[in-house]
Image: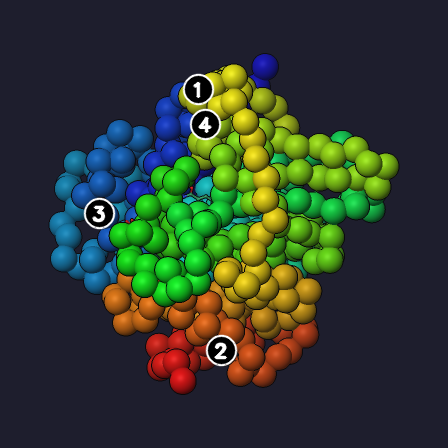
Amino acid sequence: MHSAPRNIAIFGSTGSIGRNALEVVEAAQDRFRVAALSAHSRLDELVEQARRWQPDWIIATDPVAAARFAPPSDLAGQWLVGPEPLVEIAAHATIDTVVAAIVGSAGLPSTLAAIEAGKRIALANKETMVVAGELAVRRAAETGAEILPVDSEHSAIFQALRAGSVAEVKRILLTASGGPFRTWTTEQMEQATLDQALAHPNWSMGAKITIDSATMMNKALEVIEARWLFGIDAERIEVLVHPQSIVHSLVEYVDGNVLAQLGAPDMKIPIQYALTFPERAAGPTLPLDLCRIGSLTFEAPDYDRFPALRLGSEVARRGGTTGVVLNAANEIAVERFQRHEIRFTQIAQACRTILDAHDYEPQPTLETLMRLDSWAREETRKWTSV
Ligand SMILES: NC(=O)c1ccc[n+]([C@@H]2O[C@H](COP(=O)([O-])OP(=O)(O)OC[C@H]3O[C@@H](n4cnc5c(N)ncnc54)[C@H](OP(=O)(O)O)[C@@H]3O)[C@@H](O)[C@H]2O)c1
């Protein structure tokens, strides 16, 4: 039994996570009502979604794209333009849950607004945790906001942690598919093309996170996310390569019990769990057929071929301003790789240089984080290898 449908705001509804979230809602319309949708550039798709879901608010976050677009007059909801309405709607009294599915640090202000307003946040935007994890978790504890992970690895850890306490955890094993270049040499990766980096073996995702998976920066960001989300020190978080992406992560307790969560590689599973928690409901995903999969394999990660992993452990350990700098440098380096300005292996090199060059502060304010975000972006735009 559950009560009235919960009002959901899906920010980044035209993205991979946003569309999956709408499929979850489609299959559970007695539980959820779509109250707000947002998109940045794909405004035709946003209008289609708005026609289907009749939200109260439809937010076109890019003012430039919105200025060139005439929204149809028959939309029932209010058409809002720019990033500012995200913050306002995230905190609106009628919103119960915010699905934070915007890519990059652009997702930070609305996620923080939802935290300040004490909402439930289904958090896909890992950048919030990387940039301002300490602050976000502290404020959530104060406001009563619930941050439910959507990243499949963090959803797995969150579920396995229900069997014990963080103090009883020996280590967290964060699984990684290894991406398309798992078996490539560094020399081969130096020549990797954009198309090759975008060809993920297991998951269909947005371009930025797909490239992050190829460099394994995605796993680095997830180590940092886990550090703040679960309040566990970096020394107890390890990466384990698991090419099949069926075991989504494991928690090893001090008594030797290891709890894993398994599931098909389908983001609808963790999205739905974040929305229905603490309940479980039948969902739109096909069951896991382990007999068909046959074998599950595991490998140690290679920190030399994937130097981004080292950056992740270091940032998770140091905290402070390191997360914002790594994240901003990576966002710009990935954009530059997409524009063919730098080579694939230079993404991690640029991040290393910018991280080393910044003025570290252990306890930054939000203003300091925002200033360093701009600084790191500018430095990475100028970066050239020596
Ligand atoms: N995809 C996955 O399976 C997956 C798994 C775990 C975690 N995540 C995380 O989930 C987040 C979204 O990933 P994704 O793969 O869904 O990305 P995506 O497919 O690229 O979608 C990103 C969404 O954000 C919107 N957006 C882009 N730039 C924006 C900006 N500056 N301001 C406001 N909105 C903006 C996009 O709008 P337009 O499309 O209209 O431009 C789109 O709706 C990322 O943080 C990612 O790390 C994703």
Q: Nearer the viewer, mark 4 or mark 3?
A: 3
Count residues near mark 1 (Cα–Cα under 10 Å), then give few for <14, some for 14-19, many for 20+.
few
Residue 247's place in the image compared with 302, above or below, is above
- Identify the element where label 2 is drawn: helix
Residue 125's place in the image compared with 307, above or below, is above
- Dot 1 corresponds to which residue? 286
Q: Give residue 309's quadrant in the image.
A: bottom right
Q: Earlier in the sequence, mark 2 or mark 1?
A: 1
Q: Amino acid at mark 3?
A: Leu
Q: Amino acid at mark 2?
A: Ile
Q: Is residue 160 visible?
A: yes
- Mark 4–mark 2 distance (CA, rounded to whole Å): 43 Å
Q: Is residue 35 visible?
A: no
Residue 256 drawn at (x, y percent): 82, 36
- Identify the element where label 1 is drawn: loop
- Mark 2–mark 1 distance (CA, rounded to whole Å): 43 Å
Furthest-right residue in view? 255
- Dot 3 corresponds to which residue? 43
- Identify the element where label 4 is drawn: strand
Residue 81 drawn at (x, y percent): 28, 55
Residue 182 drawn at (x, y percent): 46, 49
- Dot 2 corresponds to which residue? 354
- Mark 4–mark 1 distance (CA, rounded to whole Å): 21 Å
Q: Earlier in the sequence, mark 1 or mark 3?
A: 3
- Mark 4–mark 3 distance (CA, rounded to whole Å): 23 Å
